[in-house]
Amino acid sequence: MKIKQDMHIHTHLSSCSRDPEQNPKAIIEWAAQNGLDTICFTDHFWDETIPGASDWYKPQDLQHIEAIREQIPLSTLGVKVLVGCETEFIGGKTVGISRAVADKMDFINLPFDHFHMKDFVCPHTIKTVEQVAELWLIRFDEVLELDLPWHKIALAHCNDILGFKPQMKAIFEILLNDNKRELQRLFIRCATQGTKIEINTSVCSSPVWQDLFSYHKAFFSIAKDSGCLFTFGSDAHHPKALNNILPASSVAKRLGLEKHHIYQPL
């Protein structure tokens, strides 16, 4: 099975990119040359109607997203091009997108564990692996309570807690050993309401992925056995990072995924 999608691409309009070479035309050409049939531009976004944005998020508004549509060429070389966003869940009921705007997006990547964003997403008091694992579970539970169009949303890179990468082995052991039933409950809920689980291939390209592969596989196996569908995304911010998606097919094979496990956008 060949994975032909990249559902997580940032363009030069994301504040974390600003790379003029990372533009829609160039990305579409790269996708066509490398056999992809579906891509999605998911620049960072915070809805200006929702209070609570960080200073970094505030400029990345709806106008910023709509500017991408204007840059898509008339010919997409046979590649289906979607325009969505990556927004932010910061706990409780606060998410950086309204239901009305979410309904207009083609697709949404929604992380709930950008814990490197101190005091915006993750309280500075969270330090131990036990605290991180507990907060991760709380946020996973909370995010699924939001009123959003879950049929076109993926929980982004939820197997890679940013800000605590050196502690991932210990965190995995807490989640997989002490909280397996809770993980199963949460993934079953994802499957029931149609929430997708992202396999972020920028994570898969790191040495840590190889070192902790057995943990990643156990994590995604719980999601698979719970009935979840998966998306694949390079999380590319620069042209060279588009190559992150190329090992997706081999990653899917190693994880035991087949075609019916992969989300196919309409």
Image (cartoon, grey):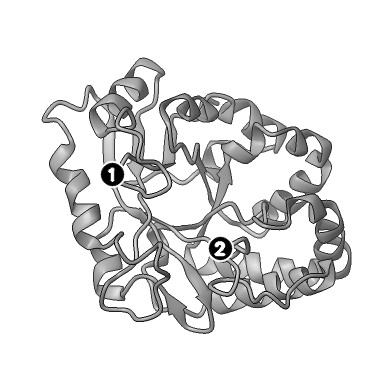
Q: CA distance from mark 2 to mark 1?
A: 23 Å
User: Residue 75: horizontal and vertical position, in percent?
Assistant: 14, 26
Q: Residue furthest top?
A: 33
Which of the two labelled residues, at mark 2 and mark 1, occupies the earlier sequence position?
1
Residue 198 as seen in the image, left or right of residue 94: right
Viewer-proximal residue among 180 and 69:
69
Check the image and report above or below for 258 versus 56. above
Give the residue drawn at x 65%, y 36%: 204
Relative height, residue 209 to residue 130 (above, below): above
Residue 199, position in %: x, y? 58, 44
Amino acid carrying mark 1 in the image: Leu
Where does residue 162 sit, x and y in percent of width and height? 64, 55
Q: Where is residue 130, by image quadrant?
A: bottom right
Q: Residue at x 39, y 68 (%)?
A: 55
- Name the secondary structure under disc 2: helix
> Is 70 on the left or on the right of 243, as rendered?
left
Q: Amino acid at mark 2?
A: Ala
Q: Residues within 10 Å of mark 2 (few under 14, many from 20)?
A: many
Q: Which is nearer the eye, 202 or 191? A: 202
Front disc: 2 or 1: 1
Image quadrant where residue 164 sits: bottom right
Write down the quadrant of residue 1 in the picture.
top right
Q: Residue under label 1, please give it.
A: 82
Q: Please state the total of marks drawn on the protein image.
A: 2
Which numbered dot is residue 191?
2
What secondary structure is found at the residue carrying circle 1? Answer: strand
Q: Residue at x 70, y 75 (%)?
A: 135
x and y, in percent, of residue 144 in the image: 53, 74
Near mark 1 (Cα within 10 A), the count class, few <14, some 14-19 or many ≥20, is some
Going by the picture, which residue comes out furthest to the front? 55
Asked if the residues shown at circle 2 and circle 1 are in contact, with their CB atoms under 8 angstroms apart, the answer is: no
Could you say which disc has been placed on residue 261 in the image?
Answer: none
